[in-house]
Amino acid sequence: MTSREAMAYDNQKLIQHLGGITANLEAVLLTAESFAEESVDAFVSEKYSCMGKVIGIYRDLLVGLNCQTREEIEDIFKNTFSDLNVQLAVEDLLGTEQKWNSFLHKVDAQLKSATGVDFRMLELGDDVPSDVPLIHVNTGDTTSLKRYLGSKNTLLVMLRHFA
């Protein structure tokens, strides 16, 4: 096999892998959108865990490309972007990721509208507002972050997790 044939083969594997990843992300997104369409409240309080599958999908993306970071994945994209079919596969993946972002922003907006709470994105190093409402998932009891933590100085790591 010539180096050009080997590169074409690798590109074909990349295209197939990206296609599978994109299809899986789309499938989970359709499920999440369906749940949220029925009831955003029920989705956020009970059915959000369907999105946990995305963690495994991205793990498959990383493992399948033998990468540890998103930067390494993007380097692969850059190195193979001369192939039109790779470009299309990458654009499909990025388009699906944009659909996910739009969906999550829509859910956040609907929650803000329903609760009056502004769900702004925090950046690394931001102070967390102490009036953030916390809801116990099992009992439905509510409290504020300030009340929960008390007056202690605390380093708080917040993750948006769906599983």
Image: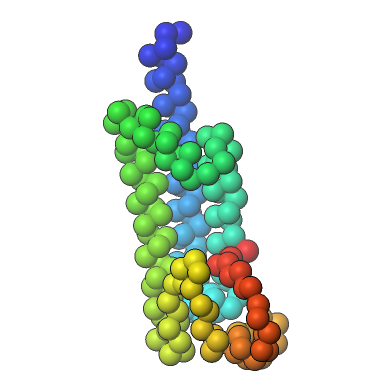
Q: Position of residue 131 (x, y in %)?
A: 54, 89
The residue located at (53%, 44%) in the rendering is 69
Q: Is residue 72 above or below residue 6?
A: below
Q: Quadrant of residue 62?
A: top right
Of the 4 image quadrants, the one containing the C terminus is bottom right
Which residue is at the far front?
153
Q: Position of residue 81 (x, y in %)?
A: 33, 32
The residue located at (38%, 30%) in the rendering is 79
Q: Quadrant of residue 101?
A: bottom left
**Residue 38 in view, yes or no:** no
Q: Is residue 137 above or below residue 3?
A: below
Q: Position of residue 147 (x, y in %)?
A: 65, 91
Which residue is at the far right?
138
The residue located at (61%, 88%) in the rendering is 146
Please state if 42 lies on the left or on the right of 107 as rendered: right
Q: Position of residue 137 (x, y in %)?
A: 66, 81
**Residue 160 in view, yes or no:** yes
Residue nearest the observer in this picture, 34 or 101: 101
The residue located at (43%, 83%) in the rendering is 118
Please state if 25 lies on the left or on the right of 146 as rendered: left
